[in-house]
Image (spheres, helix red, strand yellow):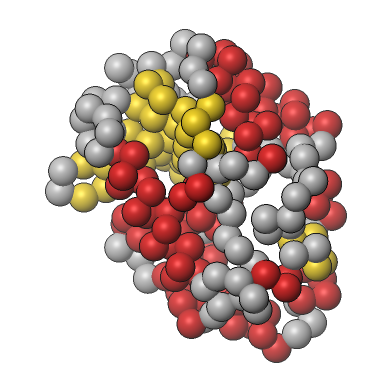
Amino acid sequence: MPIILLIRHGETDYVKKGILAGRLPGVPLNEHGRAQAQKLAEKLTGAPIKALYSSPIERAVQTAEPIGAALGLPVIQRQGLIETEIGEWMDVPVKKLNRTKVWKKVQGAPAIFRFPGGESFADTQHRITAELVALSSQHEPKDIIACVSHADPIKLAITYFLGVPLDLFQRMQISTASISFLHMGEFGAQLVALNLNADGSIPLPKA
């Protein structure tokens, strides 16, 4: 099975200000986020990537587009890569939520948490992992594919494939415009690299 590059979208004003966007429409990359996306495209130019997939949310597609242009690949939108549905918490500052008792459950016991009017983390994990397995099955074992998604889905996918309990997924850091590599082997997945920043060197796998 192939190597999957899990790419988080670039910065938005919501990320910068600490506000939860979720699936809220009209949250594009800000100026820094657009620069991050361009740096990603420059770093990935010439990489032997066979296909480029993206969450359909605007900020993810905007991150994927310059990468696709650099690689000569279309951006294929996939619903399975979408952000967690956070329901009533969309457009709410983290500082406000941090003062509530339920926030402790989000951080300490996410396996039993469901967003009001939205998904549970378990729902998101099931969706993203099923999507990555489905995409992997469409490619040859030596292929490299890229998937642009969001912080929580990426963290949940990595913890699942490594056999890490869901309750520990919040301990992982996935920065904006970062790349993590998963090698989807026949007998399990290997984490090749985690949270590589576009501003530094990216040790791309060879074809």
For residue 6, above or below residue 115: above
In this picture, residue 55 sits left or right of residue 166: right
Q: Position of residue 193 (x, y in %)?
A: 42, 39
Q: Position of residue 110 (x, y in %)?
A: 52, 76
Tag count:
0
- Residue 29 vs residue 105, the one in the foreground: 29
Q: Position of residue 71 (x, y in %)?
A: 51, 14
Whether residue 192 is visible to the viewer of this picture, yes or no, is no
For residue 129, above or below residue 98: above
Residue lying farthest bottom? 101
For residue 169, above or below residue 175: below
In this picture, residue 51 sits left or right of residue 98: left
Residue at left offset 50%, top offset 47%: 79
Q: Position of residue 156 (x, y in %)?
A: 45, 59
Dividing the image into 4 quarters, which one contains the N terminus?
top left
Residue at left offset 30%, top offset 17%: 207
Residue 55 position by quadrant: top right
Whether residue 132 is visible to the viewer of this picture, yes or no, is yes
Residue lying farthest left? 187
Residue at left offset 34%, top offset 54%: 130
- Residue 31 vs residue 82, the one in the foreground: 82
Residue 126 position by quadrant: bottom left
In this picture, residue 22 sits left or right of residue 135: right
In this picture, residue 4 sits left or right of residue 15: left
Residue at left offset 63%, top offset 39%: 60
